[in-house]
Image: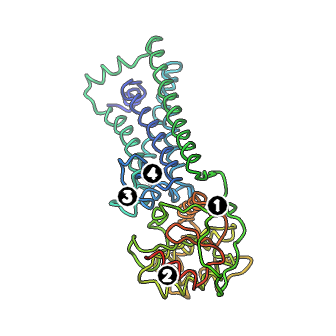
Amino acid sequence: MSSRALLLYVSAYRPVMERTVLIASLLGIVVNMHAGLQLTVGFPNGCLGLNLVPGDLASCSRAIHGGMPFVTGLPSLEVMTGLLAIVALVSILFFVVSYLAPRYSRWVALARLILLAGAGGLTTYYLVAASDGPGGSGAIAVLTGVSLGLSLAFVVASTFVSPRTRSALMASSSFTPRTFRREAVLVLYLVALTIVLVGADYAAYDALSANNGAPGVDRTASVTTSIAAPAVRASDSGPAVCGYDESRSTVQQYKTLVGMDDPTVGAENADAVTVVEFFDPNCPHCATFHTVMKRLIDEYGDRVRFVFKPIPLGQKSVNQIEALYAAHRAGSFLKMLNAQYERQSPAGLSTDQLVDIAESIGMDEQTLQSAIEEDRHMGAIRLVYQQAQRVGVDSTPTVMINGRFVRADSRTVECMGSLIESAAG
């Protein structure tokens, strides 16, 4: 087939294939929007909330968060939803142009083919990157990739049909006013159905949040301005009675807060008593409470799981948290955190200072610097921010034991130890 003939053939409107491309794109949008809502409630019933695609918070959120390779720091869910929306819009544009201005349809068709090829390749790349390898979990990326992959397969495979079949398709691809109206009605129905499904999904989530008293997530809020001022400073002398903050609801599914990206110290058993701390490395009270945490780790590290959740209270903390995650991957989290607290200053720590820390603790400086420059762990930072809002964290440090919030005046070695022993039964 000559290049001109191929161009003419690609620009032909084939109803079955065009419907498939549009339906796959719109389905991908619905799936991604639903996945975004599931993220806000911690994926209690699998990656899609229907118990059809299993996965914990770590594996499911890994497919949603984490910077795309060419859009650093932007959650992949937003990137993929945007790509699918563009594919759907170009498909509708191709339908309209094929009838109203057929001489331009070939260029629209080629643009869509390039878009599908690029999006498919980008999805494949991200699926591997987000899953930490081909065998990892990435259900949302898989479904998105399948939608794009099927669309691309239809476009590419259609160029290899026999000449006789090709001629028949070309003959059937011409528009009449009747066929145009029929296709237009179908496109409108599909778009309307997509809007209804997404709207119903959001309405169901809002109703569920209202019934459960769960706070919604403001997706437009900055991760650096969502948490209030630091809480009461912990001291070594405990209160008369140690206890939990009864004014705050217990997080029943607290185990879903613990993901593969979270720095964890101590027992590896998921059934062990779990202590979760939301903190900021530039928070003075967090630095004070860290002395308590270190003593608790020394005493209970063999039977208690300690989970660290860093939240940036200001922009100056973002790079430091990137460094903490990079150190966690290198097996040096506590060393990095201890060093950051020791050098804590009102202005925060510069990249050069963080690199110096990396060198002093035996961590590869280039790995740390590239992680900061590429915002490599921004997805994890955003996820912790959303978790904090979902469970009602409003200050740092905030500490939970098996999902129960510890009172500020009980964050001492003595009280924490007593509460841990009680939780262990």
Q: Looking at the picture, which amino acid does disc 3 mark? A: Ser
Please name the residue that numbered disc 3 is placed on. 137
**Residue 223, numbered circle:** 1
In three-dimensional space, the C-alpha distance between marks 1 and 4, rounded to whole angstroms, equals 26 Å
In three-dimensional space, the C-alpha distance between marks 4 and 2, rounded to whole angstroms, equals 32 Å
Question: Eyeballing the image, is 382 above or below 190?
Answer: below
Q: Looking at the picture, which amino acid does disc 4 mark? A: Leu
Name the foreground residue: 284 vs 330: 284
In three-dimensional space, the C-alpha distance between marks 4 and 3, rounded to whole angstroms, equals 17 Å
Please name the residue that numbered disc 4 is placed on. 122
Q: Residue 355: x percent and y percent?
A: 59, 80
Q: Looking at the picture, which amino acid does disc 2 mark? A: Ser
Pick whichever of labels 4 and 2 is earlier in the sequence. 4
In three-dimensional space, the C-alpha distance between marks 3 and 2, rounded to whole angstroms, equals 25 Å
Mark 2 surroundings: few (<14), some (14-19) or many (≥20) residues within 10 A: some
Mark 4 surroundings: few (<14), some (14-19) or many (≥20) residues within 10 A: some
Name the foreground residue: 105 vs 49: 49
Q: Looking at the picture, which amino acid does disc 1 mark? A: Val
Quadrant for residue 337, please give it. bottom right
Mark 1 surroundings: few (<14), some (14-19) or many (≥20) residues within 10 A: many
